[in-house]
Amino acid sequence: MKTAGNHTVTAETRMSEAVSDNPFLLLLLEHLGIGLPLQEKSLGQVAVENGIGIELFLTFVRLYGDLNHSVDIQFTGEEVPSIIRYLQNSHRYYSDEVYPGIMETIDRMNLSGSSGETMMTEKFFREYLSEVRNHFNYEEQTVFPYIVHLHEKVSGRQMSGESPDYSVSEYREHHDDIEEKLDDLRNLLIEYLPLKEGIQMRRMLLFKLYELEHDLRIHSRVEDHILIPLVASMEARLKESE
Amino acid sequence: MRTQTNIVVAEPSGLIFSGLVTVTGNSGRGITLIRAESAVEIQRIVTMREVEAVIVNPALITGNVRVIQGIRNSSPGTKVVALVYAFFDENLLSLFDARISITDSPERILAAIAGDRSGSVSNDNGHMSASLSEREIEVLKLLASGMATKEIAEALHISTNTVITHRKNLSAKTGIRSVSGLAVYAVVKKYITPGSISH
């Protein structure tokens, strides 16, 4: 049994050990654009080689190990590019891989015996997808460009140019709860839907949903507990200097 | 295993309270009755102690039905039981988990307030699985057909707040929060047909 539980990881912990303990870290690496093999590198080395602040990287790893890990570090603002990269790559992972996979499983259920209930499930998931796409589009087209612009301004790399008329408080309000429908789908599949397909198909779908939920929860934590406070502090700094 | 069961009673009549004390005292189930004088006091007790059930005379909360939601929020496992011996609007009574009447047998009263939680059992997902009241089913059907809260209130001649309470109860009982999820539920349970859902 390995001992490197993700809540006790430090900069010296071997990255490969941490991944063996918690395979979900493979997703973290992917979202940050870090490839395998990991060789004998420590977490600290992996962070430095990939231009990610070690405090941020450790926070990510700990969040993957424990969703309730409290984020209590002071960010400098230099973390912005890594966080945006993480969020954009995870959007891509959901849109290009996870959602099509779930849709395919639902389609196979339809093929194996369509019923009013299966069609409703498909419709329900399609509705969810369109909401999620809107949410992602809003972040990609409005929120992220604003944050990048703000970061450049704060770090003195761009003094001119009008700031987009926007503030992080708007993002907070817009931050829809896209987890609600996913919970509903899970509850419907486990408790209520009398689908005609075998138990395997439902298990496959549920496992896919669990995988998605897990990563989405971390995604929301990163947005709520890291990105939003960071942006709020950059906004405050900019206001002070103006 | 818990050996003592706390039950809060909000009932202005001393005579009826004494009757409850006798029924529960004779049951040998280790039931302790705690008398509450007001909604605030109920809230305070359920926050501080583990309470199996709250028995409320609906007359005490007619102007303030939010009390029920308050109890559920503070103490999700606590059953809220109406003690009925006068006429009350069905909308009000449907907000309770169960109801007892002064003409009920001691067994029926005990089953409703302690031990037998057949009406509402908390499951692993944390929501209460309970059969829906007729009014809740009516609200569910209209909600699933695409009607907004205000439209449902008008159709059923009830206030929008009552519709919202029914909606919350529906989610608490089914574990499904979104309207489209509730629509799927309504089809599965055959309350509506897929064709009756507006697009």
Image: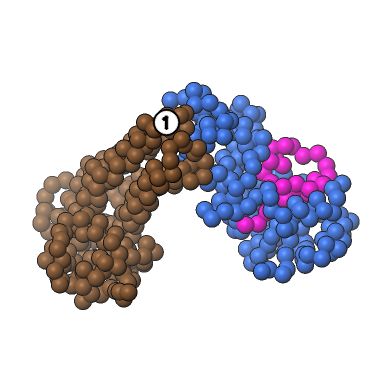
Within the magenta stretch, is there residue B98?
A: yes
**Does residue A4 appear to the left or right of B187 in the view shown?**
left
Q: Quadrant of residue A38?
A: bottom left
Q: In which quarter of the image is residue A86?
A: bottom left
**Does residue B78 appear to the left or right of A228 in the view shown?**
right
Which chain letter matches label 1?
A
Residue A57 position in % (x across, y down): 23, 65
B117, A57: nearer the viewer: B117
**Does residue B65 appear to the left or right of A102 in the view shown?**
right
- Compared with residue A120, is residue B123 higher up or lower down, i.e. above or below? below
Is residue A2 something that shows in the picture?
yes
**Does residue A122 appear to the left or right of B188 in the view shown?**
left
Q: What shade does chain B have?
A: blue
Q: Residue at (50%, 37%) from the top-left corner? A: A194
Which residue sits furthest top?
B195
Residue B96 position in % (x across, y down): 69, 46
Residue B162 position in % (x across, y down): 62, 38
B176, B189: nearer the viewer: B189
Quarter of the picture holding the N terminus of chain B: bottom right
Q: Give the range drawn in magenta.
A: B77-101
Q: How is the image coloured?
A: by chain
Within 10 Å of the Cα at label 1, are there few (<14), some (14-19), or many (20+) other Cα atoms? few
Q: Residue at (59%, 33%) from the top-left corner? A: B139
Within the magenta stretch, is there residue B30?
A: no
The amino acid type found where label 1 is placed reads Gly
Quarter of the picture holding the C terminus of chain B: top left
Q: What shade does chain A have?
A: brown
Which residue sits furthest right?
B15
The secondary structure type at the circle numbered 1 is loop
State the residue position of label 1.
A113
Q: Residue at (20%, 55%) from the top-left corner? A: A30
- Compared with residue B102, is residue A226 higher up or lower down, i.e. above or below? below
